[in-house]
């Protein structure tokens, strides 16, 4: 077994959306930017849902 101390590449760091949110606020100079980003993502999701085909009356597997 290796008893050397861990290096930064030994572990994966998960940071979440914090750094991206801070960068977005820093670039736009407004604290409302994350809200606008979230609204844009919601519009994209809404368009995807509206364009999806209804499949509730079709069988799961067709013979």
Image: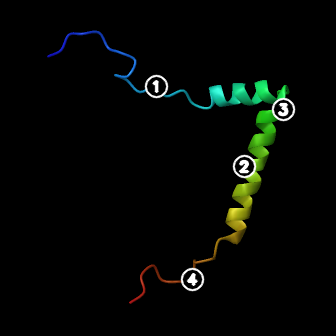
Q: First in sequence: mark 3 or mark 4?
A: 3
In three-dimensional space, the C-alpha distance between marks 2 and 4, rounded to whole angstroms, equals: 29 Å
Query: Residue extending furthest left?
Result: 1
Q: Nearer the viewer, mark 2 or mark 4?
A: 2
In three-dimensional space, the C-alpha distance between marks 3 and 2, rounded to whole angstroms, equals: 15 Å
User: How many C-alpha atoms fall within 10 Å of the one at disc 1: few (<14), some, or many (≥20)?
Assistant: few
Q: Which residue is mark 3?
A: 32
Q: Going by the image, does 35 lie left or right of 60?
A: right
Q: First in sequence: mark 1 or mark 3?
A: 1
Counting from the top left corner in percent of width and height, residue 23 is at: 71, 27
Provide the secondary structure element on which disc 4 rests: loop
In three-dimensional space, the C-alpha distance between marks 2 and 1, rounded to whole angstroms, equals: 25 Å
- Hey, which quadrant is residue 45 in on the image? bottom right
Counting from the top left corner in percent of width and height, residue 33 is at: 81, 34
- Hey, which quadrant is residue 9 in on the image? top left
In three-dimensional space, the C-alpha distance between marks 1 and 3, rounded to whole angstroms, equals: 27 Å
Please give the count of numbered marks on the rendered protein. 4
Q: First in sequence: mark 2 or mark 4?
A: 2
In three-dimensional space, the C-alpha distance between marks 4 and 1, rounded to whole angstroms, equals: 45 Å
Question: In the rendered image of this protein, does residue 45 appear above or below residue 37?
Answer: below
User: Which mark is on residue 57?
Assistant: 4
Q: Which residue is mark 2?
A: 41
Q: Which residue is mark 1?
A: 13
Q: First in sequence: mark 2 or mark 1?
A: 1
Give 37 or 53, whichever is nearer the viewer.
37
Question: In the rendered image of this protein, does residue 18 appear above or below residue 35?
Answer: above
């Amino acid at each position: 077994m290796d008893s050397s101390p861990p290096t930064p590449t030994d572990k994966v760091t998960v940071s979440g959306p914090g750094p991206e949110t801070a960068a977005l606020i820093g670039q736009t100079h407004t604290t409302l930017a994350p809200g606008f980003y979230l609204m844009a993502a919601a519009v994209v999701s809404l368009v995807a849902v509206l364009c999806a085909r209804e499949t509730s009356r079709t069988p799961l597997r067709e013979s």
